[in-house]
Amino acid sequence: MEERETFVLPGGKEITILHLAHRGIAYLPQKIWSAKNLLKLYFSWNELSSLPREIGKLSFLTLLSLNRNKLSSLPPEIRKLSSLTELYLIGNQLSSLPPEIGRLSSLTVLNLSANQLSSLPPEIGTLSSLTGFYLDGNQLSSIPPEFGMLSSLKTLHLGSNILSSLPPEIGKLASLTILDLRRNQLSSIPPDIGRLSSLTELNLVANQLTYLSKEIGNLKNLKYLHLFENQLTYLPKEFGKLPKLKYLNISDNPKMIYPPRVKWESREACARRIVKHCQEHEEIFSRRGRFNAMWNSLVLLHLAWRDEENCAHTFTRLPSELIILIEEYAVAVPFVAIEPKGENRIKKPRLC
């Protein structure tokens, strides 16, 4: 299809897929523009600093991969790629997007991770077919309200930006299943997030969250919730209304206040029982991950019980996997290893 020294189109043969990655090329060969039936173009890991306007001639192109080049902008002619369904621009130097990006009505996957984007054009909201949008590792301080118009969006990655807030329109993404907001500067999330009825995974790691709104209890399909490295002081009792939650991580929240209703015992008594149980179940406790899962499950249960009346109701709504863990380990590994002082915090017991 192509040679290393020169780019040659075989006479009389229609090219539909063209691989030119890892070639150290600083420009797109002119003969590409004559490949009218080209469907997929792979040009990643090269030295391309600008995308020629002729790119608009490839009207049948469905996939364009330009990862790891040196692009700082996209030409307005990008709008002519009416058949494009996948666009990959990871690891370039893009600081902005042209409004014409919104004309790519067939686009389903747009990956702009590891660029230098500080803002997004409102026209981004017209990408009605988009299902996967990846914006990790940019410099975004906000996202436009038009995001709420992305009715087909299922996966949204906004990690490692500088977001300090989210627009209420985020709650309009009814099809969203995965929302990744790790490593931003969020101090709160809007109550509208409770309207994401299809959400199964929410990642809020390493933000500045001090509380969670009670509307998070409306996420009936949520399975995975990542909250470590924040400034949370408590979890709302509405956590007991999350029937499908399987994984919760709230470690490294130094201001977390645990309920004072927990049964306290001496450090020595707790240590003796943990040592005994470790000896009896050495194989199970040698798997650190199992212990961490059990610990987070117990934290979830106790923090959801904010009042006595809600206690039994909360327990019945917990996933069966968590109930099994609680029944199996609640006696052997208690929450408390020291007497309550100050803010009634609970120390996580160490494994022997």
Image (spheres, helix red, strand yellow):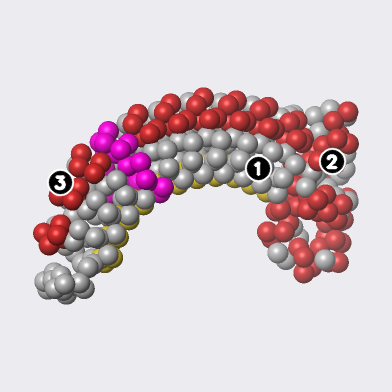
Tell me which label, 2 or 3, sits earlier in the chain: 3
- Taking the image as drawn, is residue 36 in sight? yes
Residue 51 in the image: state x and y as whole percent: 18, 49
| Relative side of 149 to 279, left or right | left
Nearer the observer: mark 3 or 1; the answer is 3
- Residue 343 falls in which quadrant of the image? top right
Say whether marks 1 and 2 touch (CB < 8 Å): no
- Taking the image as drawn, is residue 345 in sight? no
Report which residue position mark 1 lands on: 222
Q: Quadrant of the C terminus?
A: bottom right
- Whether residue 100 appears in magenta in the rendering, the answer is yes
Q: Residue at x 85, y 41 (%)?
A: 316
Q: Amino acid at mark 1?
A: Leu
In the image, the segment drawn in magenta is 92-115
Q: Secondary structure at mark 2?
A: helix
- Whether residue 30 appears in magenta in the rendering, the answer is no
Q: Main secondary structure of the magenta part?
A: loop
Q: Amino acid at mark 2?
A: Phe
- The single residue placed furthest to the front in the displayed view is 12
Instruction: Give the spatial CA distance, label 2 vs label 3.
Output: 61 Å
Q: Residue at x 60, y 41 (%)?
A: 199
| Relative side of 20 to 142, left or right | left
Q: Which mark is residue 53?
A: 3
Instruction: Give the spatial CA distance, label 1 vs label 2.
Output: 17 Å
